Image (cartoon, rainbow, N blue to C red):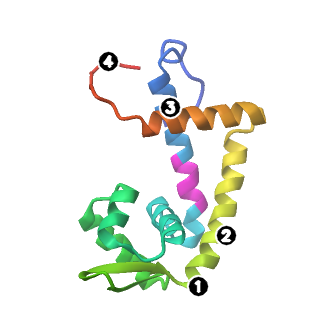
């Protein structure tokens, strides 16, 4: 696989390449960590948002999770089938549905968060605590930046 083995020096000068490669490794390992629970990273993301924002509407949940609305319906259906989520009438808008985690989901999410934390510690073990904090701040800054221009330039 392209994310295994040494990084060619010709490609190591491109931060975008390095991020993509690290992203592939991280995604594959996170997916594997969730596999014993028969869950996908998108389930983890949705459950994490629901834990922080109980009763969020399905539409807003799709926006927060960056999942298109039709796919979000399927994700919530899957969580409901597992007994991890429930749709309830929204008291503020009878056309909308409020989504909540179940107690079983809360227990599972706590277990998954521990796995995710262990995976992060392992993935970033080569960095000092200060380097991890700096990297996190920089990644958050890049991830939340609003680009006003787009270019095809490689980075």
Question: Is there any visible trace of residue 126 in the rendered image?
Answer: no
Alpha carbon separation for disc pair 4 and 2: 41 Å
**Which label is found at residue 137?**
none
Residue occupied by mark 2: 111
Chief SS of the magenta region: helix
Alpha carbon separation for disc pair 1 and 2: 13 Å
Query: Which numbered mark, 1 or 2, is in the foreground of this view?
Result: 1
Residue 60, how many percent across, how many down?
33, 65
- Quarter of the figure with residue 30: bottom right
Q: Which residues are magenta?
A: 27-33
Image position of 105 with respect to 63: above or below:
below
Residue occupied by mark 4: 153
Q: Are marks 4 and 2 in contact (CB under 8 Å)?
A: no
Alpha carbon separation for disc pair 4 and 3: 15 Å
Q: Earlier in the sequence, mark 4 or mark 3?
A: 3
Query: Which numbered mark, 1 or 4, is in the foreground of this view?
Result: 1
Residue 39, how many percent across, how many down?
50, 68
């Amino acid at each position: 696989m392209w994310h295994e083995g040494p990084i060619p020096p010709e490609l190591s000068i491109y931060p975008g390449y390095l991020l993509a490669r690290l992203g592939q490794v991280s995604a594959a390992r996170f997916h594997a960590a969730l596999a014993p629970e028969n869950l996908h990273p998108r389930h983890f993301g949705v459950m994490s948002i629901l834990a922080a924002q109980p009763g969020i509407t399905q539409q807003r949940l799709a926006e927060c999770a960056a999942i298109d609305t039709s796919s979000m319906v399927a994700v919530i259906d899957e969580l409901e089938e597992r007994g991890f989520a429930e749709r309830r009438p929204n008291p503020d808008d009878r056309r909308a549905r409020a989504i909540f985690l179940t107690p079983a989901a809360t227990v599972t999410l706590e277990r998954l968060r521990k796995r995710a934390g262990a995976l992060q510690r392992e993935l970033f073990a080569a960095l000092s605590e200060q380097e991890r904090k700096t990297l996190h701040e920089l990644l958050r800054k890049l991830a939340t930046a609003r680009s006003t221009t787009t270019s095809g330039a490689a980075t």
